[in-house]
Image (cartoon, rainbow, N blue to C red):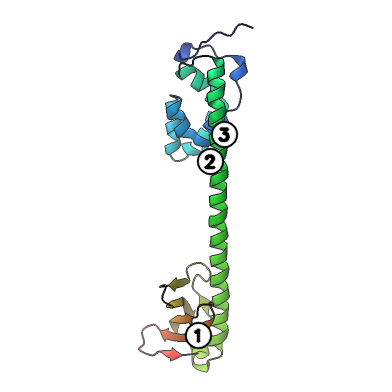
């Protein structure tokens, strides 16, 4: 079978039918693949909105772009190189998936921790008559489980803070935690007041 090397002639390049296939390296690695394969349209991946389309365009047209824009020794050279890009692309995709998965898992654990400590704290402060009066029946925990704060200074100084909107205004709730994240003590400080209520 005749195997003419028509690569590297830009718009005048004849594209062999055998390379009109999906290119996983171009899909996953976009601009990195594009620079190496002289297909600079891949740099559009840096633009908002376009970055959603570019990977799919490169996946579908990557082989044709690479064959047109770069001179290859022969077809085997081209295919070998693109297979290497495909392996690199899938490796990148797998590593990225693992990183995202770990990040989501850690975020979920943090969220569950915040919700758990918030609920424990609410149970404790509702037992205090003075705080319960300030809160009223229809209180609101500000961003519970999302922006509630847990800080560990590494010297046993771990604490947890939430803000509550009660019937008489806002109050800051500060809970000290032990090394096992059990609540040791709780203080409540109504905003706009010098009072500090020791709950636990």
Q: Which residue is mark 1?
A: 184
Q: Nearer the viewer, residue 51 or 39?
A: 39
Seen at 57% across and 53% down, the residue is 101
Residue 162 position within the rendered picture, expressed as x and y whole percent measured from the top left: 47, 76
Badge 2 or badge 3: first in the primary sequence: 3
Q: Which residue is mark 2?
A: 92
Looking at the image, is 159 positioned above or below residue 69? Answer: below
Q: Residue furthest right?
A: 1
Q: Quadrant of residue 124?
A: bottom right
For label 3, the SS is helix
**Whole-Å distance between the Cαs marked 2 and 3?**
9 Å
Looking at the image, is 91 positioned above or below residue 123? Answer: above
- Is residue 41 visible from the viewing direction of this image? no
**In which quadrant of the rendered image does the N terminus lie?**
top right
Q: Residue furthest bottom?
A: 129
- Is residue 69 visible from the viewing direction of this image? yes
Labelled pair 2, 3 in contact (Cβ < 8 Å): no
Labelled pair 2, 1 in contact (Cβ < 8 Å): no
Q: Which residue is mark 3?
A: 87
């Amino acid at each position: 079978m005749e195997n003419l090397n028509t690569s590297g002639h830009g718009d005048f390049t004849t594209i062999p039918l055998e390379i009109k296939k999906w290119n996983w390296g171009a899909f996953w690695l976009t601009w990195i693949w594009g620079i190496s394969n002289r297909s600079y349209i891949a740099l559009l991946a840096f633009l908002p909105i376009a970055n959603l389309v570019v990977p799919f365009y490169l996946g579908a047209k990557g082989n044709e772009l690479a064959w047109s824009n770069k001179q290859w020794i022969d077809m085997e050279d081209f295919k070998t190189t693109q297979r290497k890009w495909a392996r690199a692309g899938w490796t990148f995709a797998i590593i990225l998936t693992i990183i995202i998965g770990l990040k989501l898992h850690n975020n979920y654990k943090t969220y569950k921790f915040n919700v758990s400590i918030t609920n424990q704290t609410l149970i404790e402060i509702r037992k205090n008559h003075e705080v319960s009066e300030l809160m009223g029946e229809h209180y609101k925990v500000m961003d519970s489980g999302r922006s509630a704060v847990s800080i560990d200074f590494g010297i046993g100084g771990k604490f947890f803070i939430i803000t509550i909107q009660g019937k008489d205004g806002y109050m800051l709730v500060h809970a000290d935690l032990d090394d096992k994240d059990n609540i040791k003590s709780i203080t409540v400080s109504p905003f706009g007041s010098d009072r500090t209520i020791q709950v636990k």
